[in-house]
Amino acid sequence: ADVTNRLATMFSMSGLADHLRETHKGRIQLLGVVLAAAVHDYGHPGTNNAYAVKTGQLYAKIYNDQAVYENSALYRALSLTDKPELDFSAGFSQDHKRLLRVTIIDMVLSTDMSRHFDIVTMVQTKVDSIMEKPVSRQVSGFLDSRHGGNNRCETEANIDIEAGLCLSDVSPDQMHLIFQFALKVADIGHCMLPLDQHKFWVGNLEKEFFSQGDREKEAGLPISPLMDRTKPGPTSGGNQAGFFEVIVLPTIGLWQALFPGSADQLHQQALSNLTFWKISGHLDQQSELQEPAGRNRSFVVKKGGMPANVHVGTIAEGSSRKQSRNSEDDEDMGDGLPADHIKRSLSARD
């Protein structure tokens, strides 16, 4: 519900919702967007894709170790409409049924954190490219787009505003990519909640992570990053600060570039939360100076409303569930962040 509500608000504030309502095809897509957010973690067991793979779970075998829980959520959710009494799309044309299904499937699969950087790169190259020319918008339309307007691209009273996307210039493929990216933004959105709520989700994520780590330990398996309860986990200030700087802020920043003014509050809250984690991490470091040397440090990278970890780490999955940590010998990149650990952690918490 948290991710769905956030995504709906993003579509309203950006003008995407009103733009899509203008055509029947767009209304079908908008329905798919909402449903994708609602079911993207359906039936999630509280462990990550890597755990499903290394323990040989049935769904891992069915989906050939690829996006295991994302595919599982889709199968379970979409199978519900096989029942006539639940098939709300019974009156749709075959083309519209297909469009709805493709929209839901592609959006949910995009939440697999192992695809995070690929999708961000595609948005930057395929969508941001159409912003190279100035975008002139009707002043009233621009303001409306920040409060659920149509994001139209007319000019009035010789007043031009050069910012963001003109949705009438967006191709179907580009729009599809925007849908995927929007769900990714919403999925890590707990990082942009008021601090108390954000910390609540981080605490729950840590419980989930440590629970998986306990199961891995009992099974004689290597404990996944950020899941060893004897080491710093998701509530570590350093882990969270790393995740914010590598994943959260660049992601919300790109959305802001596409739709200026549509997520100011989310962006500002993310900055505020990052400040909290930086201060917390600084205090942790001071405390570590008093501890024996050789203790592993970690860094969070996240997905689904929650950071996954790095310096190790893993990027999490689902609204507040992808995070992980661990590594000692990786080459550091900037503030002690291991270069290749970030990419490796993308697959750790899906």
Image (cartoon, helix red, strand yellow):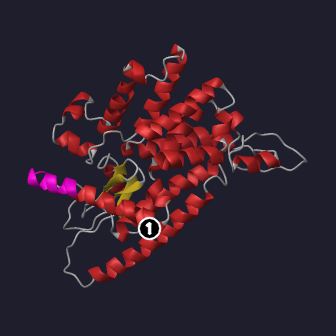
Residue 226 appearing in the image: no
Q: Which residues are magenta?
A: 211-222
Q: Picture coordinates of residue 295 (x, y %)?
A: 21, 72
Q: Which residue is painted at 74% across and 47% down in the image?
A: 144
Q: Which residue is painted at 33% across and 77% down in the image?
A: 284
Q: Is residue 237 above or below residue 324?
A: below
Residue 25 appearing in the image: yes
Q: Nearer the viewer, residue 12 or 113?
A: 12
Q: Quadrant of residue 110?
A: top left
Q: Which residue is painted at 50% across and 39% down in the image?
A: 180
Q: Which residue is mark 1?
A: 196
Give the number of marks.
Answer: 1
Q: Which residue is painted at 69% across and 44% down in the image?
A: 132
Q: Quadrant of residue 123?
A: top right
Q: Is residue 85 left or right of residue 103?
A: left
Q: Picture coordinates of residue 19 (x, y %)?
A: 68, 35
* Magenta segment, prevailing SS (helix, strand or loop): helix
Q: Is residue 297 above or below residue 26?
A: below
Magenta stretch contains residue 51? no
Q: Nearer the viewer, residue 123 or 147?
A: 147
Residue kind at label 1, given as amino acid type: Asp
Q: Quadrant of residue 96?
A: top right
Q: Is residue 155 left or right of residue 290?
A: right
Mark 1: give few (<14), some (14-19) or many (20+) Cα within 10 Å. few
Q: Picture coordinates of residue 57 (x, y %)?
A: 18, 36
Q: Nearer the viewer, residue 113 or 267?
A: 267
Question: Could you tell me which secondary element the residue under label 1 belongs to?
Answer: helix
Residue furthest to the bottom: 290
Q: Picture coordinates of residue 27 (x, y %)?
A: 61, 29
